[in-house]
Amino acid sequence: MVTCARLLALFLLGHIGFLAAADPAKTYTIQTVAGTNSVGDGGPALSALLSQAEGVAVDSLGAIYVADADDNRVRKITPDGVIQTVAGTGVAGLAGDGDPANAALLNHPYGVAVDDRGNLYIADLGNARVREVSAGGTIQTIAGGGSVVPGGNGDGGQASIAQLLEPRNVAIGADGSLYISDFGAHRVYQVSAAGILTTLAGTGNAGFSGDGASARLAQLKAPAGVAVDANGVVYIADSGNNRIRKVDHGVISTIFSVVAPTGVAAGGSGSVYIASGSYFGTQYKTVAGVASARDVAVDRAGSAYVTTGQFVRKVNAAGAAATVAGSGEARYFGGDNGSAKAARLHAPSGIAVDDLGNWYVADTANHRVRKITPAGVISTIAGTGDPGAKGDNGPAALAQLNAPRSVAVDSLRNVYVADTGNNEVRRITPGGAISTVLNQLNDPEYVAAGTDQSVYVADAGNNRVVKLTASGTMSTVTQVVQPASIAVDRSGDVFVSGPDSVSKIPAAGGFSTLLDGLQSPRGLAVTPDGDLLIAETGANVIRRVTPSGVVSTIAGTGVAGLSGDDGAAGLAQLNAPLDLAMDANGAIWIADSANNRIRGLTPATAIADDTASTETVVNAATLQAGPVAPGEIVTIFGAGFVADQTQLLFDGRPATIFYTGANQINAMAPADLTPDAATEISILVKGMKIADFSSSVAVATPGIFTAANGTGQAAATNQDGSINSASNPAARGEIVTLYATGQGSSANAVNLTVGGYPCELLYAGPAPGFPGLMQINARVPSGFLGPGIQALALSAGNARSQAGVTIAVR
């Protein structure tokens, strides 16, 4: 019987090489040419980008911690004013427990607190969890994510199995107790140092009642902030009731009325600091200079730190206010008249190039068209940033656009804009004047320049492609359902994409479908040699189709993400590529929309049969370069390899080859390599040596095989033999099977954790019948492990597997 696990093992050995290119002359390297997600890490905090600074805390050494909710990060500002991300990557999600916090995913963190030992606590509101970052930098969920509803019979259990709704803020007491204001549950919880959760205040029903009596029987309404003083008195920003309330020895009372308080802090000598949307103040005195306050923290000198969305402000004991962090720049727009690589784009959807090498970008969500010169300088040539339709017959830079999705340039260097939100096509002359040339449209998705000064438009809402001649006459070229993109070749043949297909309309007439079964092909371009390039948005790849119909993938792994710059384009991740264009030098630029970037593909140099490019050896599971372990499955990237005529030698000893492509070899390193030494690797083609290079040898380099690209979902099967995934998680306590490589000697002890909790290993050794492949049968921890996407970590001896690998648990 062929089990699902065996099929998966066969897939791993037989399918690792699927990214190898068939023709090295048409392979590419990838890099970002415009757009950045840089938020200023490593530089002055005053120059850093803060999108939605909410929670704030200050430690005993004067470092400030800020929860940037909209950017899904927690930032740290050192006493000397340098800012750094300590948790989160900027991408919303839930992953990373048990791994470094700066590689983990958060989801709108709102509150932060820090204890005297340097441990950081995060109210990860969007994930309904509280997470702790140890002083060593490892993140872990300590409250929330479970199914036990606190309150009444739910109190008194482990916080890690409790169900939180919207943890908005956190505070830490002198005794190590953690306090959580649950905005959505209308409660404040206390978590003891032993991890036991109890309700401190609130019944769970929104309202106002209970002052002068037990806090557990009182009603709160959307408590946003929480603080605790040195005596254990807890203060609550009861935002929905416009009050600051105090819990002292279990009794609740109102101490101050203020409109919509969102933050509260306890200072020395009984002072209470309050942040609300209208002002920041203390219990007795309003402090001038800080508006739109979100949260507040107080240091030992009596200075208060206040978040205001894009800034962190410091108010000293004398009441003087100054900005300590935040540049005030918009999150998604910036960088004009500087390097395009340092600019900020927002969902760029269209790209075109003129004969001088200038690139034009439809910066869709910024309602602008931007230009990038051959020197890499970016500027705005049309649009003010405010959506609208004003400005025709005037300077394009002063005109309004509304979500422009496509641009094209004709031979006279007129720029045409599919001004989608205005249902128009507009023209920008070389002198910078803008006008509307077509307005009888419905959702124009794309615009393309023809060979005779004509313009083609994908009029998606009207299910047609229209043509505008140089004389201004409009005609329908063809009816097609929801046309998304258009390309025109030198012969005047028109290519058009629909929801799942690409069709051709020859200049001589007719209509034929070239490809179907695609996943939302949204961008098209034709190369000088007649190849068709397709941005297959739904598949997150770029395809190339030759005139004879051969289809190859030239960029993207098929998994949405952002990775791979300065490497092979086939190993890079894209995220919703919407358009592409090729310049006169053969470079292809991609509107990598969901990554807010323009990515460039540079043709790799063709390699003769007797030469090879610089080789790179990586772990076949992690796709990361580094030392080789004895018996490890490795992948070598290069060029000039020939299937069935290539040999791979380690110190003169042949390696077992599983796959050879023109640019890639998958093989198993000899099991008798000497650790802590170097090995000389040689590649021979047709008996002639084409490459010689060396690699260090490690005792072990464990790597877990994943569904794609070395990170994310592990290649794993559940106890019933089905493939593990977010939609098919493994139950806690059940057995899962994983695959890895790089154990080195079998004497290297193997350990596995899920979500930071150790697993019982029923088997960890060679996968039967698959050289170099390691099989691990492990029981998913029960107990405190919560459901969801959990981090996997494998160790062999003292070596640890790659970060970012996950498994789904229910």
Image: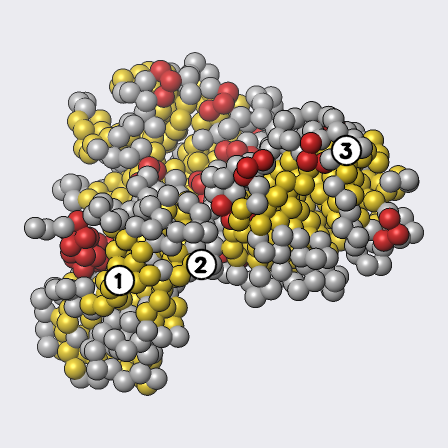
Tell me the SS state at disc 3. Answer: loop
- In the image, is residue 614 above or below residue 42? below
Q: Amino acid at mark 1?
A: Leu
Which residue has dot 2 on it? 756
Seen from this angle, which residue lies furthest top? 440
Q: Residue at x 44, y 36 (%)?
A: 349
Closer to viewer: mark 1 or mark 2: 1
Find residue 562 and name its label: none
Mark 3 or 2 closer to N-term?
3
Q: Position of residue 74 (x, y in %)?
A: 61, 51
Mark 1 or 3 closer to N-term?
3
Residue in front for this viewpoint, 422 or 97: 97
Q: Position of residue 347 (x, y in %)?
A: 48, 38
Q: For the residues labelled 1 and 2, say whether their Cβ atoms are less than 8 Å apart.
A: no
Q: Quadrant of the C terminus?
A: top left
Q: Residue at x 66, y 53 (%)?
A: 177
Q: Residue at x 42, y 20 (%)?
A: 443
Q: Residue at x 24, y 82 (%)?
A: 673
- In the image, is residue 30 above or below residue 466? below
Q: Residues within 10 Å of mark 1 (few under 14, many from 20)?
A: few
- In the image, is residue 184 above or below residue 624? above
- The CA distance from mark 1 to mark 2 is 18 Å
Residue in front for this viewpoint, 657 or 702: 702
Tell me the SS state at disc 1. Answer: strand
Residue in front for this viewpoint, 217 or 271: 217
User: In the displayed structure, does residue 61 sit left or right of residue 755?
Assistant: right
